[in-house]
Image (cartoon, rainbow, N blue to C red):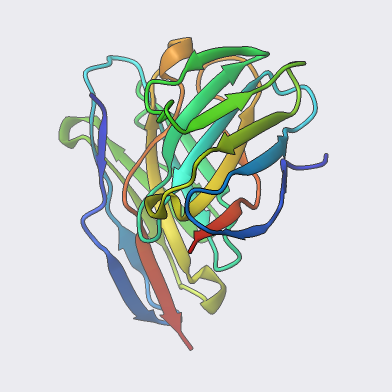
Amino acid sequence: AQKVTQAQTEISVVEKEDVTLDCVYETRDTTYYLFWYKQPPSGELVFLIRRNSFDEQNEISGRYSWNFQKSTSSFNFTITASQVVDSAVYFCALSGVDTGRRALTFGSGTRLQVQP
Amino acid sequence: EAGVAQSPRYKIIEKRQSVAFWCNPISGHATLYWYQQILGQGPKLLIQFQNNGVVDDSQLPKDRFSAERLKGVDSTLKIQPAKLEDSAVYLCASSSQGTGQPQHFGDGTRLSIL
């Protein structure tokens, strides 16, 4: 069975602080994909990034960066110089590769509040 | 490119009544998913379609929930009869065929059961 754990329920920071959202996963698959989604107050889930299990390179996109460590089954997300617009719930998710295993298994989410 | 369309946006019904949700995926997306998101939790899969065939409905409460995607495009999810614990946001997502394709979500339907 697949499982995603986001231990941080809620994080509050002041604007311009850096913040890291943790994600730990469990899977028996040797090939899998990891995702991060953002859910702002409006409710729509917005896709941020996808990583496959064979690519452990860290990725940076603007103020966002992701650290994938297969050895610790973690896929952490860092926002640099946070802004009020970053306030949202962030979900980490996992999927397999076979047709019947492509549905996403989500963590419980981390609510990020960025105070001005 | 138009996103995933869902309707209605909100629905309030009494327990034991029936309700239906509609989803139109992104054009050309072969795979369609319905997820249930209870307040404070991550979304959980209800059913996955590949074109008009069901791939995974193992977590769908089949005594009360049903879903169809007759022409391989839009889809309907129905609950009959509704229970109090069905209060949630119902999210539809679609993706193109292939492994690791990101799923794109609609705005969801927020269902409240009185």
Q: Position of residue A13 (x, y in %)?
A: 35, 79
In which quarter of the view is residue B1 placed?
top right
Q: Residue at x 41, y 76 (%)?
A: A113
What residue is shown at x 71% (from left), y 52% (from top)? B8
User: Where's residue B10, x and y in %?
Assistant: 64, 60
Q: Is residue B10 above or below residue B72?
A: below
Q: Residue furthest front?
A: B16
Above or below — where is B110 with respect to B90?
below
Residue B109 x/y as whole percent: 61, 52
Q: Residue furthest left?
A: A72
Q: In which quadrant of the rendered image does the N terminus of chain A lie? A: top left
Q: Is residue A15 left or right of residue B77?
A: left
- Report whether residue A97 is seen: no
Please indicate whether residue A71 sits to the left or right of residue B83 in the image.
left
Rendered view: B12 above or below B102? below
Q: Position of residue B42 (x, y in %)?
A: 38, 49
Residue A30 drawn above or below residue B13: above
Instruction: Kindly give the residue lying farthest to the right in the view shown.
Output: B1
